[in-house]
Amino acid sequence: MRTDNQSFLGDPPKDFILLGVSDRPWLELPLFVVLLVSYVLAMLGNISIILVSGLDPQLHSPTYIFLRHLSFLDLCYTTTTVPQMLVNMGSTSKTISYSGCTVQYAIFHWLGCTECIVLAAMALDHYMAICEPLRYTIIMHRLLCQQLVVAAWLSGFGNSLVQVVLTVQLPFCGRQVLNNFFCEVPAMIKLSCADTAVNDTTLSVLVAFFVLVPLALILLSYGFIARAVLRIQSFKGRHKAFGTCSSHLVVVSLFYLPAIYMYLQPPFSYSQEQGKFISLFYSIVTPTLNPFIYTLRNKDVKGALRRLLERIWRLCTR
């Protein structure tokens, strides 16, 4: 008879146990409520941004093309992870199938890398709007925006494919407990009983490329933007330019800071206990806050949302 260790060396496990906060039972109910409310808000907020920016003719500029894709990414982010977390917290079974786990971390990684590039494209759009206003419509035309978005999705998919191919080859030797809320590549690598040097190096190199290169472009863009804003004579002009960029900077900070902490620390210093709560933050908190950050600080979006609600009200009261 084969032992569990021997069987898992040849065959992948059938499922994994997602520990979550099972070691703190008193925390499950409050966290379940927070996740449920956050998920509903994230769905409503991001769907509203997608509908408003798609239906309102005044929001068909390049800025809102990128914003629409950012909202779609956030929508997919939460849907990839939160329903499974809610099911696990609401039941005694905390399992996820091996195939379900693979699909989850593949999509999660794909979306994360895609969002890095979309945020960089948004910074480029802001740079052109503020620093090159006369050439903005010529350079940032619709075709270029679509090409940037397609490049972001394809690049993210390629990176995810590499990570999945390397991760599915790892043996787990009977170790089925993931100290996380959902399946994620660093947690899977940490769980393996094999030499994971290749996986660790590949993850670090690719994530560094997809995180640090877009972040460097964002910071460079905002360096030029800051210099251009300081040259504006009127306070009103400076305030308008600052308002255009501040929402994006807040979103960039909420997304990049946890990602840098999570993925760019040395493998030996990776803490699953800290990592799972950082993962929880950027998988639900950031996608929930993003639509509110953009709507509360953007007059065009608020105006378009008001017009959409008025149109819906007129249709309902006929």
Image (cartoon, grey):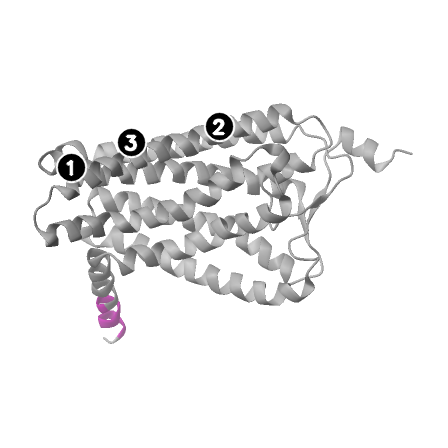
Q: Which residue is mark 1?
A: 131
Q: Nearer the viewer, mark 3 or mark 2?
A: 2
Front residue of 48/269: it is 269
Q: Which quadrant, please, contains the C terminus?
A: bottom left
Q: Secondary structure at mark 3?
A: helix
Q: Quadrant of residue 311?
A: bottom left
Tell me the residue that label 2 is attached to.
206
Q: Residues within 10 Å of mark 1 (few under 14, many from 20)?
A: some
Going from the N terminus, do you reach mark 2 or mark 1 first? 1
In the depicted structure, whether residue 194 falls above or below residue 99: above
Rendered location of residue 71, percent (x, y): 36, 49
Give the Cα distance between marks 3 and 1.
22 Å
Give SS at disc 2: helix
Q: Amino acid at mark 1?
A: Cys
Looking at the image, which residue is at 25% across and 76% down? 317
In this orientation, which residue lies closer to the viewer: 151 or 188? 188
For the magenta stretch, what is the residue range?
310-316
Q: Please identify the residue farthest to the bottom as the structure is shown.
A: 317
Picture residue at 36% right of the left edge, 59% below the top: 45
The residue singled out by tag 3 in the image is: 147
Q: Is residue 107 visible?
A: no
Q: Earlier in the sequence, mark 3 or mark 1?
A: 1
Q: Pick out the residue farthest to the right.
A: 1
The spot of residue 91 in percent (x, y) is: 67, 62
Identified at 10% across, 44% down, the residue is 232
Is 312 magenta? The answer is yes
> Which mark, residue 226?
none
Q: Residues within 10 Å of mark 2 (few under 14, many from 20)?
A: some
* Relative to 312, residue 18 above or below: above
Tell me if residue 69 can be seen.
yes
* Amino acid at dot 3: Gln
